[in-house]
Image (cartoon, rainbow, N blue to C red):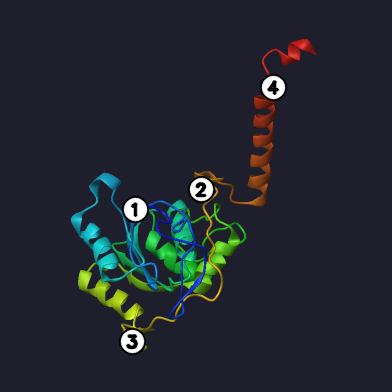
């Protein structure tokens, strides 16, 4: 579906729900848009390349949206992938839960990074605290997007599980009116988050987070190199010869 299709300005809806803003969801990706008023989204961890996604993973995505999720899709990387997901989640205040499922990515530890982000947040260098993921840096989203995600969305941990019926039960429990036990959780639809949505997109300032500076010294050195590059680029052919 096209982002923002059928959306209007942010206005209250009946039953403690809101209409997502125009432009929702703000980031493209491998997801399906379902019921905008649903309190739950489904994230299936993807450890395969795009041209080799197995039918079982595609089925989990379909189960999510068919059961009533607002968004259901795959997540592959622990940096830019998470950033894009966060932007889409906080753009819809109705989304209060995120079900993480599917087999973990051994190279990226993406699911574990999302769980750690939910519990611990990020440090001063924008690294997700408490994760073993190799490059869990969230440089391309405002800090308010990260904090809003942690305030607004509760993560339901089904990592390394791929039973479609289990995912269906989790989604179903999230939109019940009365508190509903599911595993170690008690789930129900609390209504929309009581603040206006954040409809942000990633900045793409750091497209290769694995090369980004890890300390103040590295950052200063990188800034000096970039300044020299800009000076070289600003010189017009023949400019030095005329001076």
Q: CA distance from mark 3 to mark 1?
A: 30 Å
State how far apart marks 4 and 3 are (Cα): 66 Å
Counting other residues with Cα less than 10 Å from the Cα at mark 4, is it few (<14), some (14-19), or many (20 or more)? few
Task: Using the numbered discs, state the Cα–Cα distance from disc 1 to disc 4 in whole angstroms.
Answer: 42 Å
Q: Is residue 75 above or below residue 98?
A: above
Find disc 1 in the rendering and name its residue.
30
* Circle 3 residue: 180
Q: Quadrant of the N terminus?
A: bottom left
In the picture, the disc for residue 235 is 4
Q: Residue furthest right?
A: 243
Horizontal arrangement in the rendering, residue 150 relative to residue 185 (left or right):
right
Is the residue under label 3 in contact with that under label 4 (CB below 8 Å)? no
Badge 1 element: loop
Distance (Cα) linking label 3 and label 2? 40 Å
The percent coordinates of residue 222 (x first, y second) are 64, 40
Q: Of the residues tagged 3 and 2, which is closer to the observer? A: 3
Please state the horizontal and vertical placement of residue 48, each as a whole percent of the image.
Answer: 28, 51
Tell me whether circle 3 and circle 2 mark residues in contact (CB < 8 Å). Answer: no
Q: Residue furthest left?
A: 55
Nearer to the camera, 121 or 233: 233
Question: What is the CA distance from the residue labelled 1 to the residue labelled 2?
Answer: 21 Å
Mark 3 or 2 closer to N-term?
3
Task: Tell me the residue at 20%/59% (across/down).
Answer: 56
Q: Residue at x 50, y 44 (%)?
A: 207
Query: Which dot marks residue 178?
Result: none
The residue identified by callout 2 is 209
Separation of residues labelled 2 and 4 (CA atoms): 29 Å
Query: What secondary structure is found at the residue carrying circle 4?
Result: loop
Judged by depth in the image, the label closer to the viewer, 2 or 4, is: 4
In-image side of 8 versus 189 (left or right):
right
On screen, 42 above or below 201? below
Q: Which circle, 4 or 3, is nearer the viewer?
A: 3
């Amino acid at each position: 579906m096209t982002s923002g299709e059928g959306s209007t300005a942010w206005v209250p809806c009946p039953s403690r729900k809101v209409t997502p803003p125009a432009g929702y969801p703000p980031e493209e990706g491998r997801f399906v848009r379902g019921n905008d008023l649903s309190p739950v989204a489904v994230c299936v961890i993807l450890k395969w390349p795009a041209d080799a996604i197995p039918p079982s993973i595609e089925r989990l995505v379909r189960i999510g949206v068919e059961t009533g999720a607002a968004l259901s899709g795959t997540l592959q990387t622990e940096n830019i992938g998470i950033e894009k997901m966060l932007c889409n989640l906080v753009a819809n205040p109705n989304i209060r839960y995120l079900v993480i499922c599917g087999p973990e990515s051994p190279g990226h530890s993406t699911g574990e990074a999302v769980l750690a982000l939910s519990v611990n947040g990020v440090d001063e260098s924008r690294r997700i605290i408490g994760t073993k993921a190799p490059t869990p840096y969230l440089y391309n989203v405002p800090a308010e997007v990260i904090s809003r995600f942690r305030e607004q969305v509760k993560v339901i941990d089904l990592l390394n599980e791929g039973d479609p019926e289990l995912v269906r039960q989790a989604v179903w429990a999230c939109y019940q009116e009365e508190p509903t036990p599911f595993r170690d959780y008690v789930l129900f639809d609390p209504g929309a988050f009581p603040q206006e949505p954040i409809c942000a997109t990633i900045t793409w300032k750091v497209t290769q987070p694995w090369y980004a500076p890890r300390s103040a010294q590295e950052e200063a050195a990188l800034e000096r190199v970039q300044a020299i590059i800009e000076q070289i680029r600003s010189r017009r052919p023949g400019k030095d010869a005329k001076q």
